[in-house]
Image: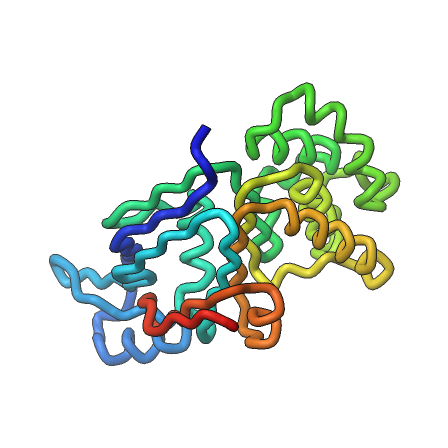
Amino acid sequence: MSQPSIQLTDVAVRIPIWSAPANRSLKQAALRFTTGGRLLAGDSGRFEVAALDGVSLDLQPGTRLGLCGHNGAGKTTLLRVLAGILKPTSGTAAIEGDTAVLIKPSMGLSPELTGREFIRLQSLMAGISPKDVEQKIDSIVDFSELGDFIDLPVRTYSAGMQTRLSFSVVTAYPTDIVLLDEGLGTGDESFQKKARDRMDRWLNNAAIIVLASHSDALIRSMCHSAVYLEKGRIVREEIFN
């Protein structure tokens, strides 16, 4: 069985803009406020945003990598490529190993699912066997502290409750690769301590961790190195002592 690894080679992600003002300067001004990607002119007057451009990474077991940059620099787009949520427009992304993703709250599944159904489906989508899911489900429900809400549709949950449920599912299973967005909280204050303890144990067992953050202090406390993104490109790399 191959070891966990991430290899990106000259990866680009371009997002087409299908309907936008014809005035190029207005469009450029708007995009500067909504994304850090570069604006490109395509065929037939169509425009594209280069969300990632020429990104290459080689991450092996033991890697603890930080992704730095301002809003729109490409951090979350890069996390989504690493998670397989986004496919590169060009270049190659080869990811070996089980991957767990904690990106900003979004249930991503039918809001009519109950919390219990969400646990089963999110677990199955992560590649967990039905047998293992059933063995874990009660402990996941207990950890989430959602009480009777667990059998109500997730559309009735607050953002904090949604985050707590997703966190409880994702961190219930060991994984090779962990992808983190610092914007993901762990719910109510009373939930924080046990969430931090569980997160520490979970991260310690991962082979590769990639953390996107605005905080230099957080990156330096959790990572061995960092890449700095600007307009979808890696502009600098740093190894911490």
Q: Position of residue 229 (x, y in %)?
A: 38, 70
Observer-nearest residue: 221 or 14? 221
Looking at the picture, tell me which residue is in the foreground, 123 or 193: 193
Residue 112 sits in quarter? top right
Q: Position of residue 167 (x, y in %)?
A: 69, 48
Asked whether 143 or 14 is in front, the reply is 143
Q: Is residue 192 above or below residue 95?
A: below
Give residue 135's position: percent from left, percent from top.
Answer: 76, 24
Outermost residue to the front = 241
Q: Residue at x 32, y 73 (%)?
A: 235
Image quadrant where residue 33 sits = bottom left
Q: In the image, is residue 177 above or below residue 134? A: below
Furthest residue in direction top, as rendered: 131
Q: Is residue 78 visible?
A: yes
Residue 152 on image: x %, y %: 78, 38
* Render colour scheme: rainbow
**Tally of numbered discs:** 0
**Left or right position of 85 against 119:** left
Q: Give the residue at x 35% y 77%.
A: 32
**Residue 155 in sight here:** no
